[in-house]
Image (tube, rainbow, N blue to C red):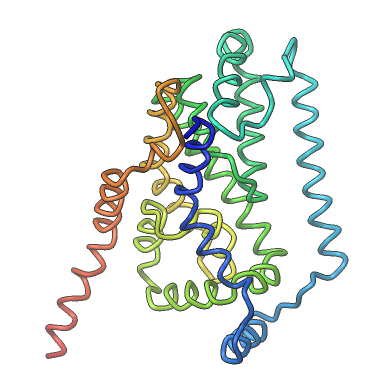
Amino acid sequence: MSLEASRVESQMSLYSNMLAFLSTPLIRFSTSEQSRKKQLYEDLSTEFPLPQWKVLAVAAIFFSFCGALLLIYFTMPDIDPEALKIPRNLADLQVMKEHLSVYTKDYTFQVLTGYVAVYIFMQAFMIPGTIFFSLLAGALFGIYKGIILVVCSATAGASACYFLSRAFGAPLAVWLWPQQIHFFRAEVAKREGRLLNYMLFLRVTPTLPNTFINFASPIVNIPYHTFFLATLFGLVPASFLSVRAGLTLGQLDSVGDLYDAKTVISLFILGLLFILPTVLTRQPQKTRSL
């Protein structure tokens, strides 16, 4: 098997759960599923397709982001366009790192500004590939600065996605993922008052895709302060893994190497520690009722 083939296979393995989770609603619905979808539409007072003014508003926000990125690009002196190509595999990322390693020493502020802007843009509009930028942070800035950079950028991007979804996203989310939205909303309702622990668990573990959490959270009535705190602190473990891997970027064969079985188990154990307090606090109440 060629190196490129193995790389593709690893990436497919890494994202298989995400694709399975998000693609389920795109199949044909049974009668009961159609009824559930209709009920969700009624409960959320949504309509799809979006009204024209909402489509125009989203387009205006998107192109405003694009304009800001172009402005940042044109203010970066002596930059090789090859250095700013969005990486889609580790080979692209290695090329990007080689171009930016020396450039970053001379133009640190410009690189930081461009990095944060691109990261937020990709997170806000759910564009895949931010994992490569997390690796790049470790390669360019080291582990401590890299973790701070990734966590802050990811939190800002997730927040942008949250507010975009709250303003415009409910119809699209219900149309794409009615079953998942129904499930997520039920789980959130059961944990009212202990949402922060639940959200920390979701952020730390690979239970749900982060893009889905970002987009669905305002629709299932997760308050922003809970969303923000869970994102800020819950993304630290995964950010640490990717930034640390970026220090030895040349030794990575695929992105899938970041999440082997041992790492996934460790993340779930850490996630269980976040929800353990909610289990312990419920136990005395059961005892009293007896």
Percent across and percent down for residue 35 are 61, 90
Left or right of 16, for residue 74: right
Percent across and percent down for residue 270 are 27, 51
Query: Quick check: 1 above or below 193?
Result: above
Left or right of 49, for residue 43: left
Image point (67%, 73%), residue name: 175
Query: Quick check: 54 above or below 253?
Result: below
Left or right of 26, for residue 288: left
Left or right of 254, for residue 61: right
Image point (35%, 58%), residue name: 201
Percent across and percent down for residue 63 are 82, 44
Image point (26%, 44%), residue name: 262
Q: How many marks?
A: 0
Q: Nearer the viewer, residue 233 or 125?
A: 125
Q: Nearer the viewer, residue 10 or 269?
A: 10
Image point (66%, 35%), residue name: 118
Q: Dividing the image into 4 quarters, which one contains the C terminus?
A: bottom left
Q: Nearer the viewer, residue 287 or 270?
A: 270
Percent across and percent down for residue 10 are 46, 42
